[in-house]
């Protein structure tokens, strides 16, 4: 896994340096829009170092968080970051998430910069795993990288460098196939973009029936 085998502190520091904390604030704003209610069950799919789980905890004082990640190093750091209490339980799961089967369906799910690191051929499996573990009408907040088509030579050069960094360092494929796949499983409620660091936040509602590949 490379970068994801490093210490969680090193990963967090690198992310902060590259975005000056703006990406984490963008993620928190997306999670806030889920409107989490006391007693809710929430899935953090690809929790990494636990930053998103901590942000979920900020809005969910009572309930249960399921945090899953495939990296032992990242998950270890996440466990140390979250402080639970009698009202809020956090269950940590080590695994790739593609075959995830929780003991209960969740009311909401969060996936921040985690689906995009999959091989594009696995996008559908990742999104389907989130969808499968959610209650009807459950809400999802997904934050990923989205790079628009360049309009100038400077934008093209800048984006080339950016792609080298996010693919080479973070393994983020930034594929145009991801969002259409997400919208087959989740009905769009709102979308917000952060052009400064090529991020998109998708807020959606679980579809009862998954759309076919030609309907998205």
Image (tube, helix red, strand yellow):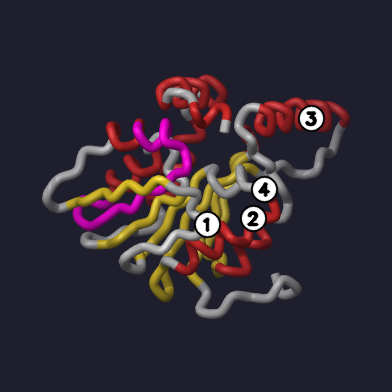
Whether the residues at callouts 4 and 2 have beta carbons within 8 Å, the answer is yes
Which residue is labeled 3 in the image? Answer: 160
Mark 1 or mark 2: whose residue is earlier in sequence: 1
Which residue is labeled 1 in the image? Answer: 98
List the single residue furthest toward the right: 153
* Real-space Cα separation, disc 4 to disc 2, in angstroms: 5 Å
Structural crowding at the residue carrying mark 2, measured as other residues with C-alpha within 10 Å and reported as few (<14), some (14–19) or many (≥20):
some
Residue positioned 22% across, 57% down in the render? 63
Q: Secondary structure at mark 2?
A: helix
Q: Secondary structure at mark 3?
A: helix
Mark 4 or mark 3: whose residue is earlier in sequence: 4
Membership of 73 in magenta stretch: yes
Q: Secondary structure at mark 4?
A: loop
* Real-space Cα separation, disc 1 to disc 2, in angstroms: 8 Å
Residue positioned 68% across, 33% down in the render? 167
Q: Tell me if 5 is positioned left or right of 35 in this view.
A: right
Residue 78 at x, y percent in the picture? 34, 36
Q: Which residues are magenta?
A: 60-76
Q: Is residue 215 above or below residue 192?
A: below
Which residue is labeled 4 in the image? Answer: 119
Residue 28 at x, y percent in the picture? 41, 43
Q: Quadrant of the C terminus?
A: bottom right
Q: Nearer the viewer, residue 60 or 131?
A: 131
């Amino acid at each position: 896994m490379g970068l994801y085998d490093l210490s969680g502190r090193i990963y967090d520091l690198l992310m902060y340096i590259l975005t000056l904390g703006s990406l984490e604030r963008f993620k928190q704003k997306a999670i806030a829009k889920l409107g989490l209610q006391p007693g809710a069950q929430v899935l953090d799919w690809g929790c990494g170092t636990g930053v998103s789980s901590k942000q979920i905890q900020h809005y969910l004082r009572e309930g249960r968080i399921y945090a899953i990640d495939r990296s032992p190093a990242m998950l270890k750091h996440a466990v140390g970051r979250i402080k639970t209490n009698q009202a809020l339980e956090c269950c940590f799961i080590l695994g790739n998430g593609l075959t995830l089967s929780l003991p209960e369906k969740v009311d909401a799910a969060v996936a921040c910069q985690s689906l995009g690191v999959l091989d594009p051929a696995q996008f559908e499996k990742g999104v389907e795993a989130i969808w499968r573990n959610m209650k009807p009408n459950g809400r999802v907040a997904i934050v990923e990288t989205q790079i628009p088509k360049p309009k100038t030579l400077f934008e093209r050069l800048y984006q080339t460098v950016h792609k080298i960094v996010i693919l080479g360092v973070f393994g983020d494929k930034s594929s145009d196939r991801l969002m259409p796949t997400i919208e087959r499983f989740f009905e769009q409620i709102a979308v917000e973009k952060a052009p400064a660091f090529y991020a998109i936040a998708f807020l959606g509602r679980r579809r009862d029936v998954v759309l076919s590949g030609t309907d998205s």
